[in-house]
Amino acid sequence: MSNLKLSARAGLLKPSPTLGITAKANLMKSEGVDVLSFAAGEPDFNTPAVICQAAIDALNGGFTKYTPSAGIPALKEAIAAKLQRENGLHATAAQVVVSCGAKHSVFNTMQVLLNPGDEVILIAPYWMTYAEQIILAGGTPVVVHARADHEFVPDVAEIAAAVTEKTRAILVNSPSNPTGAVLPPTVLQSIADLALAKGLWLISDEIYEKLVYGVEQISIGSLSPEVEAQTITINGFSKTFSMTGWRVGYAAAPLEVAKAMSNFQDQVTSNPTSFAQKGAVAALALPADEVEAMRAEFAARRDLIVGLLQQIPDVTVPIPRGAFYAFPDFSAYLGDRFATDNELAAWLLESAHVACIPGSVFEGPGHLRLSYAASRANIEKGVARIQSALASL
Ligand SMILES: Cc1ncc(COP(=O)(O)O)c(C=O)c1O
């Protein structure tokens, strides 16, 4: 009998359909097909030059060695100051753990909070990585569905009803990928009250915090010191500063959790890249108007894509209040021709040469996710292609 087998854990991992569609779209492009992509999960701007320069200076200055696993003191201090200044949190540098992207911070969080069988409440539609990482930590995702006609703001009574003896945490992602939902203060307060009453962790992924349109983003941990004492706030540099490839994110957590995450990271990755951390320090010193210029461009694109999608017959478009995704409902087009949004997305790529992510990926069946991290010209062309393809059915 052979022992040349993979672990059961390896078998748990599902391939990312987002990467699958992106790979297919890229293959078509390389074959000369004019594919317009709404698949991207990253801003299409360059990283601001001062951030790049800080990393170049760090490299040229020999800042190329190991750093403390949880990040260099200057960056942890700058993050703590930012969280205090902008988010109303009280985290100190010792409570900050810098990791290789916010995705890594979410992973560390699940690894240090969950025992096998523990449940984490996710609000669907949700970023699928959460579910995968909960499962990798031996936990079980418990899904509460938010409704499209409520702009994907969940009903907190339904979250309360999903709490069991095994619930350990509620995960909040506002603004949300994939829906763009931004949770209003009253809803955040009710979720926080529930977590306090039941003794649950709150995991708050705030990576899209700066990308809000006419509404306010609130850090749930800022609601009171008691809430903050149960909250792991996760954020990063990828979206706000267009630094997806740099791989720098962070968590701010109660000291005991931060220490556990830091120990965990010691044994898994060690520090995030030294010179990328110097770039991140520069990012936090960036004048606010540079970030605002990117936000304003996204705001204009949001208005454009929502307006265009609303013109497609029988498509309803919940208004995204944040992030850079629209999540329209195409279920009127499902049935005989396409059984699912997966088939619709595959057909749109094949026949209209437009790449979108099927909503089922995020437990939002019937919808498609369209990222508007694309030029205005491509948004106009891409939605027109979708509209005429559907009209030809
Ligand atoms: C909701 C959400 N959280 C976290 C991340 C990961 O960001 P990072 O690049 O910092 O790992 C993403 C990226 O798509 C995201 O959509």
Image (cartoon, rainbow, N blue to C red):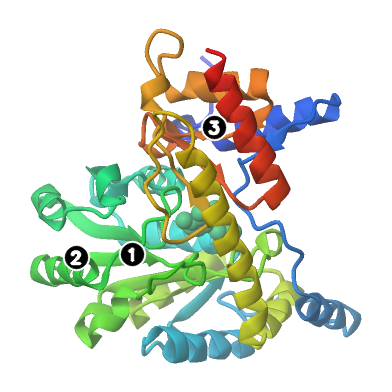
Where's residue 203, x and y in %? 33, 64
Where's residue 276, x and y in %? 72, 72
Is residue 167 left or right of 328 when viewed as pictured? left
Query: Mark 3: which amino acid?
Result: Pro
**Does the beta carbon at disc 2 come under 8 Å from ligand 1?**
no
Residue count near mark 2 (Cα–Cα under 10 Å), binned few <14, some 14–19, many ≥20? many
Q: Is residue 36 visible?
A: yes
User: Which residue: 36% across, 62% down?
Assistant: 182
Where's residue 46, x and y in %? 77, 64
- Image height check: is 72 above or below 382? below
Q: Is residue 4 visible?
A: no
Question: Residue at label 1?
Answer: 203
Residue count near mark 1 (Cα–Cα under 10 Å), binned few <14, some 14–19, many ≥20? many
User: On residue 17, which mark appears?
Assistant: 3
Query: Mark 2: which amino acid?
Result: Ile
Query: Mark 1: which amino acid?
Result: Ile
Task: Describe the element under mark 1 as helix, strand or loop.
Answer: strand
Q: Which is in the foreground here, disc 1 or disc 3?
A: 3
* Cα separation between marks 1 and 2: 11 Å
Q: Which is in the foreground here, disc 1 or disc 2?
A: 2
**Mark sitting earlier along the chain (1/2):** 2
